[in-house]
Image: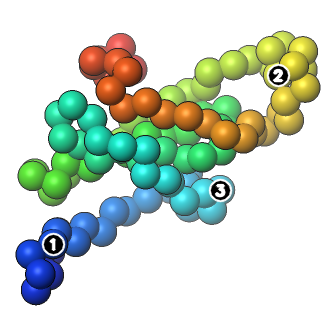
């Protein structure tokens, strides 16, 4: 983390290996109640990562989500097998990531 001449914080985030393979850049989805900046892919794959960046500690937490829907759901509602578009993330909707 660096501070520029105007006092703004500049942070450089590293991506997980999975994101580099898919060439999917994470999008900014907001700030959690804990002050962490939340990044997630805009395309929902079978599994994906959420990135939580804490600017105060200059640390990143990476949460792996193994999947949300199964093949039966995908075929019934006509979703492509590998991915779905328009994933929505609501950072303050859940209070804890402990269940993940």
Tell me what residue is drawn at x 48 percent, y 45 percent.
40
Q: Dot 1 lies on which element?
A: loop
User: In front: mark 1 or mark 3?
Assistant: 1
**Image spot of residue 58 (x, y percent):** 15, 56
- Above or below: residue 13 compared with residue 90: below
Mark 2 / mark 1, whichever is N-terminal: 1
**Image spot of residue 92 (x, y percent):** 32, 26
In this view, the residue in front, 21 or 28, is: 28
Q: Which residue is mark 3?
A: 22
Residue 86 visible to an observer of this rendering: yes
Report the side of 48 relative to 3 (left or right): right
The quadrant holding residue 83 is top right
- Quote the CA–CA distance across marks 1 and 3: 31 Å
Residue 74's disc is 2
Tell me what residue is drawn at x 29 percent, y 47 percent.
37
User: In front: mark 3 or mark 2?
Assistant: 2
Tell me what residue is drawn at x 37 percent, y 21 percent.
93
The quadrant holding residue 8 is bottom left
Quarter the N terminus occupies: bottom left
Mark 1 / mark 3, whichever is N-terminal: 1
Quarter the C terminus occupies: top left
Q: Dot 3 lies on which element?
A: helix
Report the side of 10 relative to 78 (left or right): left
In this view, the residue in front, 95 or 46, is: 95
Q: Which residue is mark 1?
A: 8
- Quote the CA–CA distance across marks 3 and 2: 20 Å
């Amino acid at each position: 983390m660096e501070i520029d001449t105007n006092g703004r914080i500049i942070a450089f985030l590293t991506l997980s290996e999975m994101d580099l393979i898919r060439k999917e850049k994470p999008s900014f989805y907001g700030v959690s109640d804990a002050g962490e900046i939340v990044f997630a892919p805009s395309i929902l794959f079978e599994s994906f990562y959420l990135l939580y960046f804490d600017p105060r500690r200059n640390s990143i937490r990476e949460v792996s989500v193994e999947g949300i829907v199964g093949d039966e759901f995908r075929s019934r509602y006509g979703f492509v097998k590998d991915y779905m578009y328009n994933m929505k993330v609501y950072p303050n909707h859940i209070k804890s990531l402990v269940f993940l």
